[in-house]
Image (cartoon, rainbow, N blue to C red):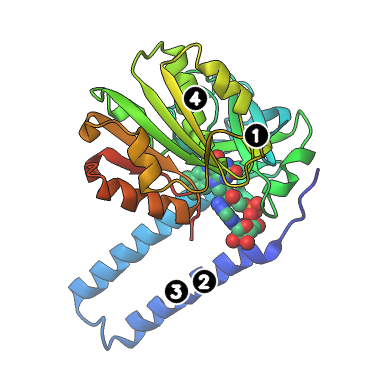
Amino acid sequence: MKIPYEPWRASHSILAMLAVGLGFGHGVAVGNYLGLFWKVTLWTAMMLVSLWLIIYVRLVKPWLMTQKPYVVEEVIPQRGDVWTLALRPLGHEGFTFEPGQFAWLTLNITPLSMREHPFSMSSSGTRADRIEFGIKAIGDFTKRIKDYQPGTKAYLDGPYGVFTIDRYWDSAGFVLIAGGVGITPIFSILLTAAERKDDRPFLLIYAASAWDDVTYREELEALKRELDLTIVHVLRKAQDDWEGETGYVDKELLENYIPLHRGSRHYFICAAPVMMDAVERALFELDVPVTNVHMEHFNLA
Ligand SMILES: Cc1cc2nc3c(=O)[nH]c(=O)nc-3n(C[C@H](O)[C@H](O)[C@H](O)COP(=O)(O)OP(=O)(O)OC[C@H]3O[C@@H](n4cnc5c(N)ncnc54)[C@H](O)[C@@H]3O)c2cc1C
């Protein structure tokens, strides 16, 4: 599948650089504000640092990425309008990562065209030979994921992020709270924990619209055999015979499940902004120490 070339993206950047450069040249030439030697030196240094940053981000970094390409190995449909995109490193070893981290993904076109999107890895952090992403079809780029064919070239910039249990080795266990596609980094955390034979208790509170939309439902169930894992599904539209939790993840629901010794666990939340805000407030009211609460925001706005 080919993506149309959009020349206006590059021309915007070049015109912006020209405008700033000409403005600076004008300021130096007129000399009203930049007459003193130290002022000119300071501003020139700032301009050179900015120029280097632009060159690094737009040229050097993308070029480095082209040296380590990936190919699409599989695209697998999941529940909840999510697609697993599995990538294999091409001619290099790939990378391992701390589960919960994310990478910037570019597909099919060169990274120089700057059309990259951030996605959390959904596979185990210990597997460098196959890196997976769980991608929800919501917009221009994500709705096309299902159409990519095996063999399509991909580029990754990562791993990044601190939404990971690896930084809390002394925690007695973890409370993981996911809403919808917010399950992806948490799924990676659980897969990695199972591979490492982590024997600490994991509580997953997982909100979804309906039972059939619970992404990785079967895979999570299977992980219960390998981990001390309790899963609380919370459905907004439950079927008639549903005996579990319904509605929203609120203070009352959390109070029923989180451990009495609140500070003995670390809490990881990834969901839609409105749910993250509500859960953060509820945890605060339930005396969970703020230093134990970690959030991953998918919305860049
Ligand atoms: C650190 C990080 C990790 C992420 N991990 C994942 C992941 O594992 N899986 C995944 O599916 N997504 C993830 N995302 C979100 C993902 O990057 C965006 O959904 C994607 O870039 C949207 O691109 P698009 O061109 O398809 O949508 P666009 O065409 O840009 O947007 C289409 C419409 O959807 C809305 N929209 C855009 N993003 C979101 C969003 N996140 N939630 C709700 N509405 C949105 C826009 O406002 C717009 O109306 C992550 C984001 C961040 C910052």
Which residue does the numbered mark 4 point to in the structure image? Answer: 95
Taking 157 as reference, is 68 above or below it? above
Residue 92 seen in the current view: no
Q: Earlier in the sequence, mark 4 or mark 1?
A: 4
Work out whether 98 lies above or below 178.
Answer: above
User: At x 30% / y 41%, what residue is drawn?
Assistant: 293
Tell us which disc is closer to us: 4 or 1: 1
The amino acid beneath tag 2 is Ala
At label 2, counting other C-alpha atoms closer than 10 Å, the crowd grade (few under 14, some 14-19, many 20 or more) is few
Mark nearer the N terminus (3 vs 4)? 3
Q: Earlier in the sequence, mark 4 or mark 2?
A: 2
Q: Does dot 2 land on a helix, a strand or a loop?
A: helix
* Mark 1 surroundings: few (<14), some (14-19) or many (≥20) residues within 10 A: few
Q: Answer left or right for 172 relative to 178.
A: left
Q: Position of residue 153 (x, y in %)?
A: 70, 34
| Residue type highlighted by circle 1 | Asp
Separation of disc 3 and disc 2 at Cα?
6 Å
Element under label 1?
Answer: loop
Question: Residue type at mark 3?
Answer: Val
- Disc 1 CB within 8 Å of nearest ligand 1 atom: no
Q: Secondary structure at mark 4?
A: loop
Position of 208 compared to 169: left or right? Answer: right
Residue at the image point whose x is 67% and y is 41% from the top: 107
Residue to which mark 2 is pinned: 16
Name the residue type under label 4. Answer: Phe
Q: Position of residue 191 (x, y in %)?
A: 50, 21
Measured Cα–Cα span from mark 1 to mark 2: 59 Å
- 1 or 2: tag closer to the N-terminus: 2
- Residue 20 numbered mark, or none: 3
Kindly identify which numbered label has been placed on residue 290: none
Q: Residue at x 48, y 61 (%)?
A: 301
Foreground label between 4 and 2:
4
